[in-house]
Structures are given as structure tokens and as C-alpha cells.
């Protein structure tokens, strides 16, 4: 078998991720669309700081998650008109599209990993007993923004696949 024949055989049989369809929205567009999700969760998180009762604080944060989820579904359906459909074909295409979905949510997850450095800076300011660091809540906001972004992409892609239905 010649090298050319071997190359042709390998490229015909291996699933190539680069030929998979694009993600429903471009990574830059998805990241822009994720900012309101983070804003909703952050707003309700800040409001929860005003509640001194732990259960009320938890309820306020939960309300923020529900509000962000409603926004994700409604906005995702609207974005489905301009999105690329989610792939349901072979495994290579699905995997390729999933790899293209990663950058926007991953940005939020990486931000959540970086936020604990804020707790260290907070203690260096010299007021560690006066106020508690918001780092834990900001990690939660970043993680929820990442999940919300991924859901937004899936809802937009599924809506596009169903032709807006």
C-alpha cells in the first residue's frame, strides 16, 4: 500500500472534527449574549446580601437563578431564528459541535476559578473582620453564568433545528 493510498484510507475512515457543523452561535456572539445572564444572577445575589435571614437570602438567590433560566429559554428561542441547528447526526459531528460550544461557557468557568484570588486580596486590604469577602458568591455567579450560557446555546440550536417551533 502506498503512502497516498494509506492517507486516503485513514482520512475516509476517521471522523474528522473539523468538518463538523459550527456551534449555534459564534463564541464571541455567545459571550455577548451571556452578559445579561451573569447580570441577572449578580443582581439577585447582591439583593440576597441585604437579607439577614439565611433562608430569605437563599430564596432571593434562587429567584435569581429562576429569572436567569426564564431569560435563557425565552432569549434562546428568539436567537434560534439566527442560530445554526444543533447536530443530531453521527458522533463525530455531535462531538465537533460540542467542542465549538465550549469557549463561551468555559470563559465563565475560568473566571469562577480565578475569583478566589479576590478573597486573598480582600484579606490584604486590612478589613477582613469588618466585611466578608464576596468571592464565594462571585464564584457562584460565574458558574451559573457558564451553565446559563451553555443552556442558551442549546436552546438556540434546538429551536433552529425545529425551525422556530
Image: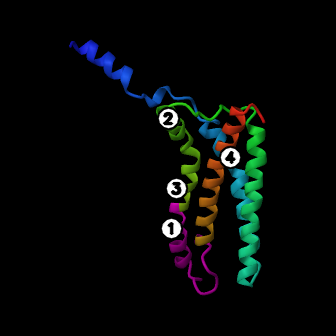
- Which residue was labeled with disc 4? 152
Count neighbours of disc 2 (C-alpha within 10 A) and say few if under 14, some if 14 to 19, many if 20 or more: many
Check disc 3 and report its element: helix, strand or loop.
helix
Check disc 1 and report its element: helix, strand or loop.
helix
- Which residue was labeled with disc 3? 110
- Give the residue displayed 30% in from the left and 18% down from the top: 7
Q: Quadrant of the C terminus?
A: top right
**Magenta-tinted stretch:** 113-135
**Residue 96: image tag:** 2
Observer-nearest of 88 and 64: 88
Whole-number angstrom distance, CA of label 4 to CA of label 2? 18 Å
Provide residue 144's location: percent of width, then percent of height: 63, 59
- Give the residue displayed 50% in from the left and 40% down from the top: 99
Task: Name the quadrant containing residue 154.
Answer: top right
Provide residue 27's location: percent of width, then percent of height: 60, 39
Marks 3 and 4: which is nearer the front? 4
- Which residue was labeled with disc 1? 117
Residue 161, magenta (yes or no): no
Check disc 2 and report its element: helix, strand or loop.
helix
Check disc 4 and report its element: helix, strand or loop.
helix
- Specify which label sits upstream in the sequence, 1 or 2: 2
- Specify which label sits upstream in the sequence, 4 or 1: 1
Marks 4 and 1: which is nearer the front? 4
Amino acid at each position: 500500500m502506498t503512502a497516498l493510498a494509506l492517507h486516503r484510507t485513514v482520512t475516509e475512515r476517521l471522523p474528522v472534527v473539523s468538518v463538523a457543523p459550527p456551534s449555534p452561535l459564534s463564541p464571541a456572539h455567545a459571550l455577548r449574549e451571556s452578559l445579561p445572564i451573569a447580570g441577572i444572577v449578580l443582581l439577585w445575589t447582591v439583593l440576597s446580601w441585604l437579607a439577614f435571614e439565611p433562608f430569605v437570602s437563599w430564596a432571593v438567590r434562587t429567584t435569581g437563578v429562576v429569572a436567569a433560566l426564564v431569560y435563557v429559554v425565552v432569549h434562546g428561542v428568539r436567537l434560534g431564528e439566527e442560530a445554526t441547528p444543533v447536530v443530531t447526526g453521527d458522533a463525530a459531528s455531535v462531538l465537533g459541535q460540542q467542542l465549538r460550544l465550549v469557549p463561551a461557557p468555559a470563559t465563565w468557568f475560568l473566571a469562577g476559578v480565578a475569583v478566589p484570588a479576590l478573597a486573598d486580596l480582600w484579606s490584604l486590604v486590612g478589613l477582613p473582620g469588618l466585611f466578608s469577602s464576596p468571592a464565594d458568591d462571585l464564584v457562584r455567579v460565574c458558574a451559573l453564568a457558564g451553565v446559563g450560557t451553555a443552556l442558551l446555546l442549546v436552546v438556540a440550536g434546538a429551536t433552529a433545528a425545529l425551525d422556530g417551533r
